[in-house]
Image (cartoon, rainbow, N blue to C red):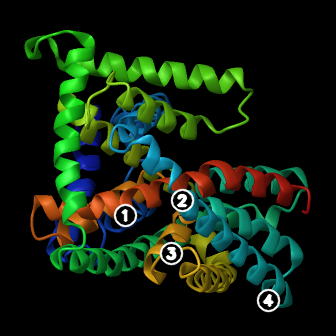
């Protein structure tokens, strides 16, 4: 009984977020609403174990991440992935802007340790927050231990709607280009490309459609994920496993081993996405109103400084890198949360901005690869490096 109730509560928070997002045309994104509901729930009557009781624990999330990233690789080709080096540069330079402004102005306002403890979670999400909390415990800075996780909670709540707003501006710009006829060829290519690659997958395996069952698709996605994680171990984690899963997904798709949109065809994509998102929201149970009240002023000021530095760096560099200002800033903002929030925000905005399915495909083709790659560059790679460096500065 408890497990069914827990699952129902988790899904209740998810669909309320989705409904609000749809009703507001993505001005209030679903992940923002769901995150707020989880925080309020944890601070009132919700058990801290509600997500784990719903079966969305660490083991499930580990499966989700690898499978979902391989799946996302089937939505793009290798050429598109390699072309996103500009998004990587913008995202990383945006993070650099955050670090510079918070280190300079922030240290005038607050203690050195306060600023050093706040920067990694501001530029790298949950993993960086947990690393800094452990580091503060090691140096016995007990008054600051709650700061990194509290920073993660607050900047997520601010970052979701801000990113959604920037994506809407970019979505409207791309939609205008498409309606003017400048992106017609891309839309046509997307449709024919999907058909060609689906046929190529069937021919490569030599099996008729009735044998392409959901279990067979999931098995192949899982096999690619195993190879990706094995390769990561082989290279001693020189490149983050998440990045390798995405690349292997792209390669498997290019070779015809995986269909376009594999997990959607298997009927499990949304379930895995909900599970991963729920697990991320479960990390919000660490904070309490008392903890937030103790560090709220430092957090708000440092977030404003950090976002200002990120905005200035990305906006100035947007034109030299051939991007619009909103797109460049959105890429940099992925450092606040990474995957899967970057995927969910982008797909929601594209769905609500587009006039039809074909236009939505064009928007996704133009925006989603930039957001995904930007998020991997910051949260999956740069955040661990930044946290490791800043731990030594405490």
Residue 378: mark = none
Marks 3 & 1, CB-CB < 8 Å contact: no
Crowding near the residue tagged with mark 2, few <14, some 14–19, many ≥20 C-alpha atoms within 10 Å: many
Spatial separation of the CA atoms under disc 2 and disc 4: 26 Å
User: Residue tagged by mark 2?
Assistant: 374
Crowding near the residue tagged with mark 3, few <14, some 14–19, many ≥20 C-alpha atoms within 10 Å: few
The answer to whether any part of residue 41 appears in the image is no
User: Residue tagged by mark 3?
Assistant: 322
Residue at the image position 70 percent from the left and 20 percent from the top? 234
User: Residue tagged by mark 4?
Assistant: 105
- Secondary structure under tag 4 reads loop
Spatial separation of the CA atoms under disc 1 and disc 4: 33 Å
Viewer-closest of 378 and 87: 87
The answer to whether any part of residue 237 appears in the image is yes
Q: Quadrant location of residue 261?
A: top left
Instruction: Determine whether, in the image, residue 271 is placed left or right of residue 116.
Output: left
Viewer-closest of 128 and 16: 128
Q: Quadrant location of residue 235?
A: top right
Residue depth check, mark 4 versus mark 3: number of the one nearer the observer: 3
Q: Is residue 23 above or below residue 137?
A: below
Marks 2 & 4, CB-CB < 8 Å contact: no
Spatial separation of the CA atoms under disc 4 and disc 3: 30 Å
Residue depth check, mark 3 versus mark 2: number of the one nearer the observer: 3
Marks 3 & 2, CB-CB < 8 Å contact: no
User: Residue tagged by mark 1?
Assistant: 367
């Amino acid at each position: 009984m408890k497990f069914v109730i827990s699952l129902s509560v988790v899904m209740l928070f998810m669909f309320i977020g989705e409904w609000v997002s749809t009703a507001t045309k993505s001005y209030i994104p679903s992940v923002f609403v769901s995150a707020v509901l989880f925080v309020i729930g944890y601070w009132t009557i919700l058990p801290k174990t509600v997500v784990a009781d719903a079966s969305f624990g660490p083991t499930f999330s580990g499966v989700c991440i690898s499978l979902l990233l391989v799946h996302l690789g089937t939505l793009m080709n290798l050429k598109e992935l390699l072309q996103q080096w500009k998004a990587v540069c913008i995202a990383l330079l945006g993070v650099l802007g955050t670090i510079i402004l918070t280190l300079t102005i922030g240290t005038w306002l607050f203690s050195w340790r306060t600023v050093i403890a706040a920067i990694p979670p501001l530029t790298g999400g949950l993993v960086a927050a947990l690393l800094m909390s452990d580091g503060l415990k090691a140096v016995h800075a007990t008054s600051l231990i709650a700061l990194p996780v509290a920073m993660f909670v607050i900047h997520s709540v601010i970052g979701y709607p801000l990113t959604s707003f920037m994506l809407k501006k970019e979505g409207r710009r791309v939609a205008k280009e498409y309606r003017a006829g400048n992106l017609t060829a891309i839309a046509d290519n997307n449709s024919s490309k999907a058909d060609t690659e689906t046929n190529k997958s069937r021919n490569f395996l030599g099996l008729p459609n009735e044998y392409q069952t959901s279990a067979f698709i999931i098995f192949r996605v899982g096999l690619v994920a195993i190879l990706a994680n094995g390769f990561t171990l082989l290279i001693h984690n020189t490149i983050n496993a998440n990045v390798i899963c995405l690349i292997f997904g792209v390669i498997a798709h290019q070779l015809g081993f995986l269909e376009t949109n594999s997990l959607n065809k298997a009927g499990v994509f949304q379930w895995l996405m909900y599970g991963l998102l729920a697990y991320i929201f479960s990390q919000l149970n660490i904070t309490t109103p008392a903890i937030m009240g103790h560090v709220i002023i430092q957090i708000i000021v440092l977030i404003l400084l950090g976002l200002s530095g990120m905005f200035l760096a990305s906006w100035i560099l947007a034109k030299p890198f051939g991007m619009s200002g909103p797109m460049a800033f959105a890429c940099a903002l992925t450092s606040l949360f990474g995957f899967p929030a970057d995927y969910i925000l982008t797909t929601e905005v594209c769905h609500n901005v587009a006039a039809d399915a074909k236009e939505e495909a064009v928007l996704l083709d133009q925006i989603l690869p930039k957001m995904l790659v930007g998020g991997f560059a910051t949260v999956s790679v740069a955040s661990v490096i930044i946290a490791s460096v800043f731990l030594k500065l405490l």
